[in-house]
């Protein structure tokens, strides 16, 4: 974070041995950190991350099949997909065309990487960042497919990414800012997520869904009260924990005495 957005990656270049020694999630984080360093610098993003990105089908051959994804490893590959999302996720520095291209690339890997939960994890977070606040129903459904594979690692990222796509939309509430055409389906998806949090045995997924519901209610104020009240009364402590995030996000920047009283209770 010290060099966020500066493109100054001298530390990584000077300590390549350290990068090579990193394993598992340390390798994922080290690779993803390149996205923080190069945030908003979209022109050379693919060239920069090419050594780490998972293989893709040739772009000039629409009939080519996506390369088979191994079920093991994938930490550098998953980290690079997350890095790509971080680079393009900044709306201030990323033009719409570049962001859409990155989103399409990431969604391709999202659909084809279910066999590897680490690559899926990185792809889902990248998709969430490049589709942030779009309320795109097609993207949400692709993320939902990953969530329903019931992989703890991939499912956590998929549910958080759904929250990023629907951030501030108020989907599932009495009033929401989603399109009339997609409102009913998005409301149904939110209801499914709530039910799924009660059915899954994975705490990571429950935590991801809690954060998703909190993100959806960003800036919703009173419109989010019913959802927050329901989360506060849930028997699962992780959902109750998510209710506090939801309350903070719903009333973010308002100075609401009501919200502060609830948080201090």
Image (tube, rainbow, N blue to C red):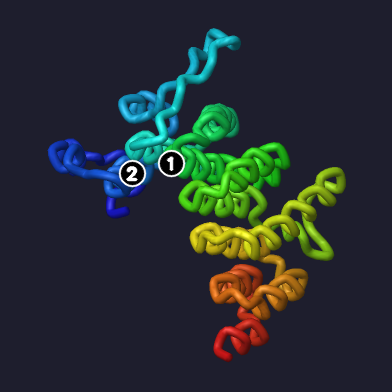
> Secondary structure under badge 2?
helix
Q: Residues within 10 Å of mark 2 (few under 14, many from 20)?
A: many
For the question of whether residue 79 can be seen, the reply is yes
Q: Mark 1 to mark 2: distance in Å? A: 9 Å
On the image, the x and y values in percent for residue 156 come to 52, 53
Q: Are marks 1 and 2 in contact (CB under 8 Å)?
A: yes
Residue 215 has which mark? none
- Residue drawn at (15%, 43%) of the image: 18
- Within-10-Å neighbours for mark 1: few <14, some 14–19, many 20+: many
The quadrant the C terminus occupies is: bottom right
Q: Residue at x 33, y 28 (%)?
A: 48
The answer to whether residue 158 is above or below residue 195 is above
| Residue drawn at 57 percent across, 84 percent down | 263
Q: Nearer the viewer, mark 1 or mark 2?
A: 2
Is 37 on the left-hand or right-hand side of 132?
Answer: left
SS label for mark 1: helix
Q: Residue 102, how many percent across, how many down?
A: 52, 31
In the displayed structure, 50 sits above or below 183; it is above
**Frontmost residue, 144 versus 227:** 144
Percent position of residue 87, x then y: 43, 39
Q: Earlier in the sequence, mark 1 or mark 2?
A: 2
Check disc 1 and report the residue beneath it. 82
66 vs 138, left or right, is left
Which residue appears at 75% of the width and 59% of the height? 191
Residue 71 pos. (x, y %): 41, 34
Q: What residue is pinned by disc 2?
A: 28
Does 157 sit left or right of 45 as displayed?
right
Frontmost residue, 111 versus 37 = 111
| Figure disc tally | 2
Question: Can residue 132 be seen by looking at this rendering?
Answer: no
| Camera-side residue of 170 and 8 | 170
């Amino acid at each position: 974070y010290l060099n966020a957005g500066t493109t100054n990656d001298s530390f990584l270049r000077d300590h390549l041995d350290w990068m090579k020694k990193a394993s598992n999630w340390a390798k994922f984080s080290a690779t993803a950190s390149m996205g923080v360093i190069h945030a908003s610098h979209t022109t050379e993003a693919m060239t920069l991350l090419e050594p780490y990105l998972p293989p893709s089908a040739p772009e000039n051959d629409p009939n080519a099949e996506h390369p088979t994804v191994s079920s093991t490893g994938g930490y550098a590959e998953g980290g690079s997909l997350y890095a790509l999302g971080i680079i393009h996720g900044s709306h201030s520095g990323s033009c719409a065309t570049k962001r859409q291209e990155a989103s399409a690339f990431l969604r391709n890997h999202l659909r084809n990487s279910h066999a590897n939960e680490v690559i899926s994890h990185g792809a889902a977070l990248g998709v969430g960042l490049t589709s942030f606040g779009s309320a795109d129903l097609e993207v949400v459904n692709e993320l939902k497919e990953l969530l329903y594979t019931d992989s703890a690692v991939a499912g956590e990222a998929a549910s958080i990414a759904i929250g990023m796509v629907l951030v501030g939309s108020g989907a599932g509430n009495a009033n929401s800012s989603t399109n009339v055409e997609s409102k009913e389906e998005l409301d149904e998806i939110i209801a499914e997520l709530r039910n799924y949090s009660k059915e899954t045995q994975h705490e990571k997924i429950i935590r991801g869904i809690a954060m998703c519901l909190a993100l959806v209610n960003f800036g919703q104020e009173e419109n989010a009260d019913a959802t927050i009240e329901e989360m506060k009364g849930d028997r699962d402590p992780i959902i109750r924990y998510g209710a506090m995030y939801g309350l903070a996000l719903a009333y973010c920047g308002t100075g609401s005495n009501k919200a502060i009283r609830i948080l201090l209770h």
